[in-house]
Image: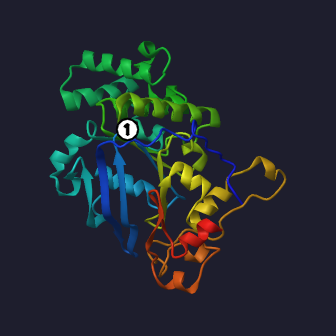
Amino acid sequence: MTSSIQLSESEGGPSLRKRERVLEVQNLHVEFHSRDGVAKAINGVDLYLDQGETLAILGESGSGKSVTAQAIMGILDMPPAKIPQGKILFQGRDLLTMKPAERRKLRGPGISMIFQDALSSLNPVFPVGWQIGEMFRVHRGTNRSDAKAGAIKLMERVGIPAAKQRVNAYPHQFSGGMRQRIMIAMALALDPTVLIADEPTTALDVTVQAQVMELLAELRDEYDMGLILITHDLGVVADIADRINVMYGGSIMETADVRDLYAKPGHPYTQGLLDSIPRLDMKGQELFAIKGLPPNLLDMPKGCPFSPRCVHVQDLCRQEFPPVVDLGAGHTSTCHYAKEVVRD
């Protein structure tokens, strides 16, 4: 079965450009220690992001997408979280070896983040303009009137109508789509080099989702920033992403240019995600679903973490963690039988 998503040269997302490497994650491990044991949430993740590029990180809930983003931002609660090994290089500097005060200064102008749930992320007792302006006051020492003016400009830039009149409104007075735009305005306040968008279209209807994604693409090009887009929806990223990393069980299962991944997935998990997309030519038929459940992070299966759910599983898959197989043109798959999967 193949995906219904078709990518042409004109609509497959921005073309890849050789630009400055702004972010690189090397062999990152994240654990959560609890009374029940050690949950291994991230297991040796490697990824990179170039200036002006969009990297999409896909996977089911619990695959490690948001934990990876929080580790990059430095906002994991430690304890219970622990990073036993790995590097997070921002413009060549390892964030994990920085002092907390030094790293805090990078949040906003260096790396910024749009959180998943705008309603719970915004403070309900402060006007949205005050919350956006706080970025200017705290990081740049801007006075209140100038911070408010800056907030109005950002609200106008992200498409909030009547920004001057609504700058003193509270979060509950905005729709879900408008609240998400306010979160984007806050994240962009200090002109970040890297923007992480964690499920930015959650709980939004399809039309608003498209508007938010179009806005993020415009802002990426306008600010020439690197964009990491975290989502479980393959349809959302088809038109905006340059590259895609597919995560499962805390590991990167597949990495590819967006067109290559949709056209010839090299991992059974990626195939399952693509086959799960509803198709117009399947009216009246039962939707495909990947059988089974994501792995228990407290008791990860031996070998490939996807082996209990994989339709191509062999004895080797249950015994040994698969190597990273090079499929050419920057396309890699963490699967013992990646080349056979691509041919299939």
Residue shown at the point (63%, 71%) measured from the top left: 292
Q: Is residue 197 left or right of residue 201?
A: left
Q: Where does the image place residue 129, in percent across and percent down from the top left?
A: 37, 23
Left or right relative to 271: residue 191: left
Instruction: Assess disc 1: are there few (<14), some (14-19) or many (≥20) residues with their C-alpha within 10 Å of its C-alpha.
Output: many
Disc tally is 1
**Residue 15, percent across and down?**
47, 40
- Is residue 80 among what the camera can see? no
Residue closer to the observer: 267 or 40: 267
At 41% from the left and 31% from the top, the residue drawn is 221
**Residue closest to the eye, 176 or 102:** 102
- If the image is split into quadrants, where does the C terminus sit? bottom right
- Does residue 153 lie above or below 276 as drawn? above
The residue shown at (67%, 53%) is 3
Task: Classify residue 273 by image quadrant.
Answer: bottom right
Front-lying residue, 112 or 313: 313
Colour scheme employed for the rendering of this structure? rainbow
Local SS, label 1: loop
Q: Does residue 204 appear anywhere in the picture? A: yes
Q: Kindly identify which residue carries mark 1.
A: 52
Query: Measured from the top left, where is residue 286 in percent x and y?
Result: 79, 59
